[in-house]
Every structure is written in C-alpha cells, then in structure tokens.
Amino acid sequence: MSMSLPVNRRRHDRHLGDGGYFVVAGKPARLVDWSFGGLALRMDEPADLPVSEDVDIRVFDAAVGAWEPLKGHVRRVDQKGVVGVAFADDGEASVRILLRLFGNRSRAARM
C-alpha cells in the first residue's frame, strides 16, 4: 500500500512571524506567519469568526507609529485560536505593506 504526500496548495512561501501587532475584526491578534497571499494570526480572545467572512485587518507599523489597513477573508479557524486570512485585494496593496514591514526579514530568510 503506497501513501501519497499531501498536496501543497499554497501559491506563496510562508514566513514565520515575530508576533507583530494586528487587529482583526476589532480584536487584538499576533502574527504567526505570513505570505503574499495572506496571514495566520493568533487571536488574543476566542476567535468567533466564521469561515469566508470578510474582515478588516490593521497592522501596526512601529517605524511610523501608525496602523495600516488591510482587507481579508477568513479561510480557516483552528482550536488554538489561529485564524488564517487571505487578502481580499489579490495582494496588491497588501504586498506593498508587507514588503515595507517584513521585506528585509523575507530576504534574510532566503539567504
């Protein structure tokens, strides 16, 4: 009996997060990991977000002391309070923000 490997359906590489400050649907969260397609965030409070719900996301940019807005769709919620969110804008605006906030870390991880 042969076993097949799970299919990786991700279009973008995942990068570990550093716990950066986020707010998802008005609730505080910490970054678990990210890609140019979306985020995995650990909610500080129980995640009562339904899968496929549109959510507003804000990420704190410490360099300028301001919050950056993002739009997303909830793709998964696990029992540990981790919410997987796909970017709603096909990543265009989100990618610019992520590159600015995390780009140096992404390049360092590939070297």
Image: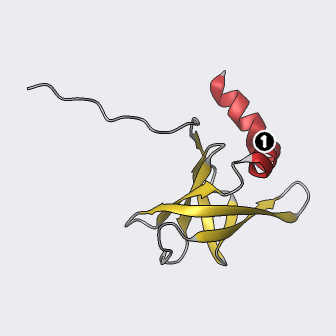
Q: Name the residue under label 1.
A: 99
Neighbor class of circle 1 (other Cα within 10 Å; few <14, some 14-19, many 20+) is some
Where residue 95 appears, x then y in whole percent? Answer: 75, 45
Where residue 62 appears, x then y in whole percent? Answer: 83, 58
Question: Which residue is located at x 54 percent, y 64 percent?
Answer: 74
Look at the picture and state if 110 lies above or below 36: above
* Label 1: element kind: helix
The quarter of the displayed image where residue 36 is located: top right
Question: Which residue is located at x 71 percent, y 37 percent?
Answer: 105
Look at the picture and state if 4 lies above or below 63: above
> What amino acid type is highlighted by mark number 1?
Leu
Look at the picture and state if 88 lies above or below 5: below
Q: Total number of numbered labels?
A: 1
The image quadrant where one finds the N terminus is top left
The quarter of the displayed image where residue 54 is located: bottom right
Residue farthest to the right, as pictured: 64
Where residue 102 appears, x then y in whole percent? Answer: 74, 43
Give the side of residue 36 with respect to residue 69, left or right: left
Question: Which residue is located at x 91 percent, y 58 percent?
Answer: 64
